[in-house]
Image: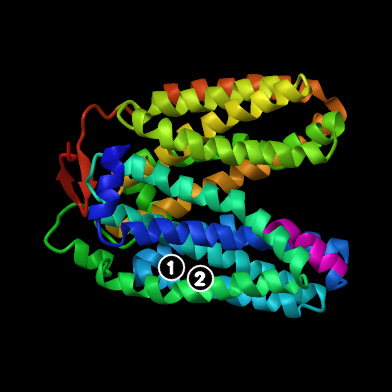
């Protein structure tokens, strides 16, 4: 991990992106846990309209992420980052002034769209700065660590603001934070100049070096088919902690313990990414690493079936270990498989795959087989399903041997 920190220090712009990610997730989680309560109690918007608004946010963020990535590849990574930040800043102002369901839906949709623009562009920017380095996966692990630190401390700061001021102040503070980040991020355009895909293809005969697009990316880089399919599996497993796990925990140990488990998850993510991810990034067989991570999540699901405080906590720790293993490795595989000029589109495709998996997870959790109806049986079924999916992910992975990394269409040997 020491080598990774050294790379961050000597790569101009890298520290800004990582710190910016922390501030963005901090600002988001400053208000997100209280958004539904604010809209219903303070703004007087009906519960069904708030539900529609949250659905609009989910699909604007995850469903449109692939188009956000495509926009970044076409018009420029830094421009897209700043547009995403601007939309998120304006969405919080709109939330404070929302007086109808339509306004709430519009504001939450803007919030999701801002994320759909920022996330793939932000990942592409980071991968451009460290392109071709052997530490790429470890850098993405640091990015995830910054995100999770912001996720852990943001709600605490938001709760403090609620105690000290009116509820709307938190949303205005989050908006001001996003506006403040626009200026330093805009200066990254000098570090990460936009290279149009056609310009990147000049003098190349490789048909893959053409303008970005989903179908074209899948045809040009068949590895992306496996990566996106793996993202669907990961999304299916990951979203269980957002819906099914709280249902089981509240039923077995009370609603307050749900918050305890989320804190355990956030702290464990940070600790494990600082200790585990860098070591695992040295293992060349990505399919085996990802399958092991999915297997850890499966074992965590099995422990959830027991329902006691000890087993729920241990289950969350195993789940978190799997999350830490899979998430940065998927990002690293995208950076390895796709050249920089088309990478934001590829990151967006991964986000779309996770959205599909998450939708399947929510459908399973809300079905007659869900934890609310079947209790422990649901988690045992999920244990079997996740284990089978982990095995399938490993056995279907493309065999690539020792093919070197890709940088702007040229083959590179990773830095040692």
Q: Quadrant location of residue 125?
A: bottom left
Q: Disc 2 versus disc 1: distance between alpha carbons?
A: 6 Å
Q: Main secondary structure of the magenta part?
A: helix
Magenta run includes residue 40: yes
Quick one: SS at disc 1? helix
Quick check: 290 left or right of 137? Answer: right
Dot 1 corresponds to which residue? 81
How far across and how far down the image is residue 273, in percent?
45, 37
Is residue 248 left or right of 185 when viewed as pictured? Answer: right
Image coordinates of residue 191 in percent, x first then y, are: 25, 67
Residue at x-position 68% and y-position 27%: 313
Q: Is residue 318 above or below residue 48?
A: above
The one of 153 and 50 positioned closer to us in this rendering: 153
The residue located at (53%, 49%) in the rendering is: 149
Q: Can residue 201 be seen at all in this image of the molecule?
A: yes
Farthest front residue?
A: 164
Residue ID at (67%, 71%): 171
Q: Coloring scheme of the render?
A: rainbow
Q: Quadrant of residue 249?
A: top right
Where is residue 43? Give x, y as percent.
83, 73
Crowding around mark 1 (Cα neighbors within 10 Å: few <14, some 14 to 19, many 20+) is many
- Range of magenta residues: 32-41
In-image side of 167 versus 289 (left or right) = right
**Res 385 visible:** no
Mark 2 vs 1: CB contact within 8 A? yes
Q: Which mark is residue 85?
A: 2
Residue toward you, 5 or 107:
5
Secondary structure at badge 2 equals: helix
Which mark identifies residue 148? none
Give coordinates of residue 185: x percent, y percent. Answer: 39, 70
Q: Residue furthest left?
A: 203
């Amino acid at each position: 991990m020491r080598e990774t920190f050294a790379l961050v220090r000597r790569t101009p712009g890298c520290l800004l992106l990582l710190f910016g990610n922390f501030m963005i997730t901090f600002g988001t989680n400053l208000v997100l846990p209280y958004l539904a309560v604010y809209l219903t109690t303070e703004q007087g918007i009906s519960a069904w309209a708030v539900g529609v608004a949250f659905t609009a946010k989910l699909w604007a963020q995850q469903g449109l992420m692939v188009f956000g990535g495509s926009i970044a590849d076409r018009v420029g990574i830094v421009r897209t980052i700043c547009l995403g930040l601007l939309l998120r800043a304006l969405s919080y102002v709109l939330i404070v002034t929302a007086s109808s369901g339509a306004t709430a839906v519009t504001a939450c949709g803007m919030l999701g769209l801002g994320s759909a623009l920022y996330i793939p562009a932000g990942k592409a920017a980071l991968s451009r700065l460290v392109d071709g380095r052997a530490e790429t996966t470890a850098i993405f692990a640091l990015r995830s660590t910054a995100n999770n630190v912001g996720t852990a401390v943001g709600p605490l700061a938001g709760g403090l603001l609620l105690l000290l001021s009116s509820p709307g102040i938190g949303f205005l503070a989050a908006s001001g934070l996003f506006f403040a980040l626009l200026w330093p991020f805009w200066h990254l355009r000098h570090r990460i100049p936009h290279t149009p895909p056609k310009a990147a293809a000049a003098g190349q005969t490789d048909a893959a070096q053409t303008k970005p697009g989903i179908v074209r990316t899948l045809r040009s880089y068949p590895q992306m088919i496996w990566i996106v399919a793996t993202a669907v599996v990961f999304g299916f497993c990951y979203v269980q902690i957002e819906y099914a796990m709280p249902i089981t925990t509240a039923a077995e140990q009370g609603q307050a313990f749900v918050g305890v488990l989320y804190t355990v998850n956030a702290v464990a993510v940070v600790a494990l990414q600082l200790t585990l991810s860098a070591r695992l990034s040295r293992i060349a067989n990505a399919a085996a690493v990802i399958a092991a991570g999915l297997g850890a999540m499966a074992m965590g699901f099995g422990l959830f079936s027991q329902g006691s405080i000890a087993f729920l906590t241990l289950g969350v720790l195993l789940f978190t270990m799997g999350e830490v293993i899979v998430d940065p490795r998927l990002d690293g595989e995208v950076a390895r498989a796709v050249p920089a000029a088309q990478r934001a589109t590829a990151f967006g495709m991964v986000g779309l795959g996770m959205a599909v998996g998450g939708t399947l997870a929510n459908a399973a959790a809300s079905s007659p087989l869900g934890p609310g109806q079947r209790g422990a049986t649901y988690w045992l079924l999920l244990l079997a399903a996740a284990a089978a999916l982990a095995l399938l992910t490993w056995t279907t992975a493309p065999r690539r041997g020792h093919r070197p990394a890709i940088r702007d269409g040229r083959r590179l040997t990773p830095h040692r």
